[in-house]
């Protein structure tokens, strides 16, 4: 039987990893992410100083405007970051804001009546589509892994409940489809927060928790969006650095490779009335 030219064996499939963490400011996103080995930090906000103060070693690219972000994408796709194992985007939320500023500034330069602080509907459409294309290209690049950081956004869903999602704006009246689209491109999406936890002696201490599975708080009804395509990270992790998470994913992969392959059930032909 002839195989479709586009098809390959699933076992031969390789892709870069794409992790996303969303949290409110001050929870330690940048410190966690810069635990990645051999990273380049694409910094669109003032988070690099915390990484330096923690003694992190890696590269730094300052993204001051959307043109810088476009140049980073070009350089990545041209192989100019192939000497790095990980690229950290800090944050996609700030990148989106810089994108919008770029779109409206260009419109104001071409139209004196355009207020650069008041975007019009076409500007939102331009910004959302260009951001999606930028993220798609960076996600798909196979030679370098990526960590995507984002702020958290508290929204009301169609059922009147409250959700916490990454701050990627667009389509507020439709449930924020741009945020959901970007999350769909990721291997993992985790929600990070500092929270109090009692130890064995009953003393309260602060831990950095990351939720890796969707969760609804029974006391508040707030829903947290997360996912784990690796199937390795559990419901949540506490005070675990990024190398520790990588070890969990690698252990899961090795366990899957060592497990005996399940034999498919024999294919049955068409049954007769006598059967």
Image (tube, rainbow, N blue to C red):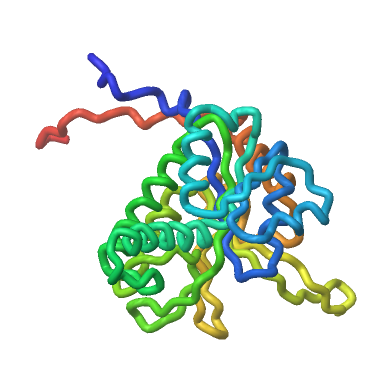
In the rendered image, which quarter contains the C terminus?
top left
In the rendered image, which quarter contains the N terminus?
top left
Pick the front one: 32 or 131 = 131
Location of residue 157 by image quarter: bottom left
Q: Residue furthest left?
A: 273
| Above or below: residue 18 compared with residue 45 | above
Q: Residue at x 83, y 78 (%)?
A: 204
Q: Can residue 99 be seen here?
A: yes
Q: Residue at x 64, y 69 (%)?
A: 25
Q: Residue furthest top?
A: 1
Along the horizontal axis of the image, is 38 left or right of 180? right
Pick the front one: 252 or 124 = 124
Pick the front one: 125 or 219 = 125
Q: Residue at x 60, y 66 (%)?
A: 23
Give the number of callouts.
Answer: 0
| Above or below: residue 54 compared with residue 259 | below
- The image position of residue 269, as x and y in percent, is 20, 28
- The image position of residue 197, as x and y in percent, is 77, 74
- The image position of residue 62, as x and y in percent, is 62, 49
| Above or below: residue 185 compared with residue 201 | above
């Amino acid at each position: 039987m002839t195989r479709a030219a586009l098809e390959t064996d699933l076992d031969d499939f390789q892709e870069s990893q794409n992790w996303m963490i969303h949290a409110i400011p001050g929870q330690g996103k940048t410190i966690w992410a810069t635990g990645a080995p051999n990273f380049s930090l694409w910094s669109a906000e003032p988070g690099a100083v915390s990484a330096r103060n923690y003694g992190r070693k890696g590269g730094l690219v300052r993204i001051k405007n959307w043109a810088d972000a476009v140049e980073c994408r070009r350089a990545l796709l041209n192989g100019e970051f192939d000497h790095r194992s990980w690229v950290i985007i800090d944050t996609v939320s700030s990148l989106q804001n810089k994108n919008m500023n770029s779109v409206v500034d260009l419109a104001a330069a071409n139209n004196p009546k355009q207020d650069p602080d008041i975007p019009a509907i076409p500007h939102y459409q331009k910004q959302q589509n260009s951001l999606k294309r930028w993220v798609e290209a960076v996600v798909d690049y196979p030679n370098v892994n990526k960590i995507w950081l984002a702020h958290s956004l508290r929204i009301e869903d169609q059922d009147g409940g409250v959700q916490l999602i990454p701050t990627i704006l667009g389509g507020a009246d439709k449930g924020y489809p741009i945020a959901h689209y970007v999350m769909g491109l990721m291997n993992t999406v985790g929600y990070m927060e500092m929270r109090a936890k009692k130890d064995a002696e009953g003393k309260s201490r602060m831990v950095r928790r990351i939720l890796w599975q969707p969760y609804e708080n029974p006391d508040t009804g707030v829903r947290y969006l997360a996912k784990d395509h690796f199937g390795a990270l559990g419901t949540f992790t506490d005070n675990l650095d990024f190398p520790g998470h990588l070890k969990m994913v690698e252990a899961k992969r090795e366990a899957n490779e060592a497990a005996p392959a399940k034999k498919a059930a024999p294919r049955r032909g068409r049954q007769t009335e006598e059967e």
